[in-house]
Image (tube, grey):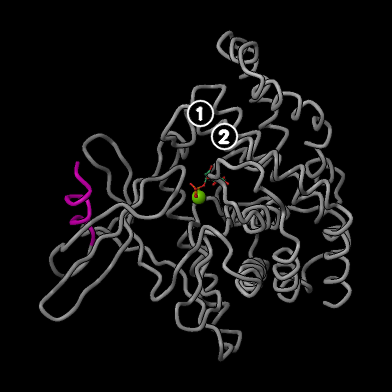
Amino acid sequence: MKPAKIAEQFEVSGLLASIRPTGSGNVNDTYLAVFRTHFSEERIIVQRVNGHVFANPEWIMENMSILTNHCHKQLQVESPTADRIWQLPRIVPCRDGQDFYIDEEGGFWRALTLIASATSYEIAQSAEHAFEIGTVLGQFHRLVSSMNPLSLRDTLPGFHETPGYLAQYDEAIKTPEAKDLVESSMEVRNLQRFVEERREFAFVLQNALDAGELQLRLIHGDPKISNIMIDDDTGKGTAIIDLDTAKPGLIHYDFGDALRSLCNRAGEETTELGKVVFDLDLCEAFVRGYIAQAKDFLTGSDKDFLYDSIRLITFELGLRFFQDFLAGNRYFKVKTPEQNLQRAQVQFRLCESIETRKRQIKEVLDLALSDG
Ligand code: GN1
Ligand code: MG
């Protein structure tokens, strides 16, 4: 079914004026739909959730209701700060009252309100922007810290458990197709070596969880820079979007994911590997913003694993891209067959940069933690 026909299934007044693809998601298909009456206009986000990735998309919608209701209540209890409006996407139901629409091919569609007067960026604009990204993630973690982590369903089992991705990689690299690639491409061999050298490190957070040093909490799961929106008028962070992967997990993966996406000014899709470096100024600004919000719920042991989390999630994402490339690009959407290989190279280069700057990153963390 055409996206225009789908958009008309949702409870919005007026006539559909336009619909066009928007965003740069690697998994779902996203459209912006504009509806008009004689007197007003309404804009909504219409999305097809990727059924290959999410086996139970209706759980995403259940989770989203529970999570946004909790955050709204929590925000009403806290006195609103004068300089910051906190927005959350709301589910736009279908005309039949359901929270989603299933098309003739079994495609799962949902609609959400658009965050008003705000923009998301792929690349950091300034240190102030980085501070806002940290503030929004810290605020999100703080708001959900009073929820029972098990109150949300696990929409994506194994998501952000690095050892599991390593096991999938070990399967992928064994296939005859992968063996051919290893033999014919030096780039592939370099990435393979990179993984081998960090095999043990892949367990660092899961081991800490098993040992009781870290605990499961609610996480966002995908707090990359482009999922945090900045108010066009005030320049302050106003929303964290893409709540599909909110689930019980380790907040460290969130902390690391926001930083790895923010501090690479060249962006995830760059083809200029030489430009991929982990930016310490952006890191410093983010960490200040985050810690100011998070200081009350971070434990001593949580703090000990913050550096590792930045390094690990960057390694993990590179591993996931590499594994998908070896397995024939079945998970992440690609425009060319080499795109996931390229993406893996970017993340591994960034991981190296994080390793080289370990001392400085730890200094930034220690300073912010002692101030906070
Ligand atoms: C995917 O679809 P998108 O772009 O929001 C992926 C994340 C990755 C991200 C990298 C469910 O997110 O884990 O960090 O790409 N989401 C899923 O850009 O796998
Ligand atoms: Mg996502």
Q: Which residues are magenta?
A: 1-10
**Residue 315 in magenta stretch:** no
Q: Residues within 10 Å of mark 1 (few under 14, many from 20)?
A: few
Q: Are marks 2 and 1 in contact (CB under 8 Å)?
A: yes
**Nearer to me, 85 or 73:** 85
Distance between the Cα atoms at labels 2 and 1? 6 Å
Task: Find residue 94 and report its horizontal and vertical position in percent.
Answer: 25, 58
**Left or right placement of residue 243 versus residue 223 in this view:** left
Task: Find residue 122 and report its horizontal and vertical position in percent.
Answer: 52, 57
Q: Which residue is mark 1?
A: 338
Task: Find residue 293 and report its horizontal and vertical position in percent.
Answer: 71, 75
Q: Which of the 4 quarters of the picture holds residue 207?
A: top right
Q: How many marks?
A: 2
Q: Which residue is mark 2?
A: 342
In which quadrant is the C terminus drawn?
Answer: bottom right
Task: Find residue 194 and report its horizontal and vertical position in percent.
Answer: 75, 30
- Is residue 82 depicted above or below 183 in this figure? below
In which quadrant is the N terminus drawn?
Answer: top left
- Mark seen at residue 145: none
